Image (tube, grey):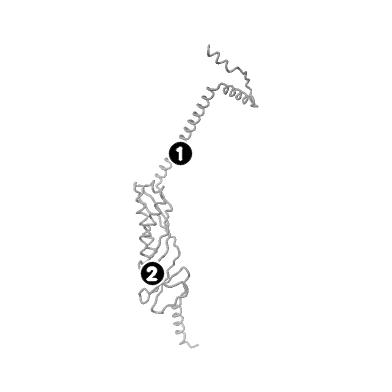
Amino acid sequence: MSVLLIPFIVFAAIVLFSTFKVLNEFERGVILRLGKFSGVRGPGLIILIPGLEKMIKVDLRLVTMDVPAQDIISKDNVTLKVNGVVYFKVSSPEHAIITVENYYHATAQIAQTTLRSVVGQYELDEILAHRDQINARLQEILDEVTEPWGIKVTNVEVKAIDLPIEMQRAMAKQAEAEREKRAKIISAQGEFEASQKLAEAAKVLGEQKDAITLRYLETMREISSSGNNTTSFFPLPINLLDKMLSK
């Protein structure tokens, strides 16, 4: 093979390599012809016109993007550190390439600013109690902003909320006081119900004399059946006390 043919072979290989492209099922190619948008191709074998057409690949799979911790001041002036995660995917490869320079970086930046803005509109108790509401609000705002970029935000989650040490201690004391309060309420409720039952029992025993006799005999039987009992009982007629008190 002549040495003069080597440059032509290399040139032909480069042309073939730049002409034929293969895209996976989850990829699309945005085609620019002489700098102008020509169309979206793929998946499968793509044939390009060498020197005239350029292809930019776009991944259509769902992207999981972590939002780093943001310093946020809540509505009631509590300093927090909040991080989150955003799930999004490219819905329009054409807009994702032409409308915005770097859709991933742009989505990351708007996610951070939106997280600070939305969470800062709530008080601390609301942030801790209504996280689902905050997630829905974040997803709504981000999806509205990124839609012109060809990006679909499918879900946003607030991952962690870090409180200052002083606030954590205060909340721990508050939770402990709340637990003690509930315990006292339950104990008082139990005593109240027990006193009601005793009052009902006393009323029944007072109205039916035979019931007092049966209860007296039952108590004696229970005490005498105890194996370790060393107390002696001398049964007396119950009405003996009534006769003594009537004198």
Which residue, given by chain and number where applicable, does mark 2 sit on? Answer: 94
In the rendered image, residue 213, in percent from the top left (x then y), is placed at 59, 21
Label 2: element kind: helix
Residue contact at pointers 2 and 1, CB within 8 angstroms: no
Q: Residue furthest bottom?
A: 2
Q: Is residue 162 above or below residue 220?
A: below
Q: Quadrant of residue 89?
A: bottom left
Q: Amino acid at mark 1?
A: Arg
15 or 125: nearer the viewer: 125
Left or right: 8 in relation to 215: left
Q: Amino acid at mark 2?
A: Glu
In the rendered image, residue 241, in percent from the top left (x then y), is placed at 56, 16
Left or right: 119 in relation to 183: left
Rendered image: mark on residue 179? 1
Rendered image: mark on residue 40? none
Q: Is residue 192 above or below residue 85?
A: above
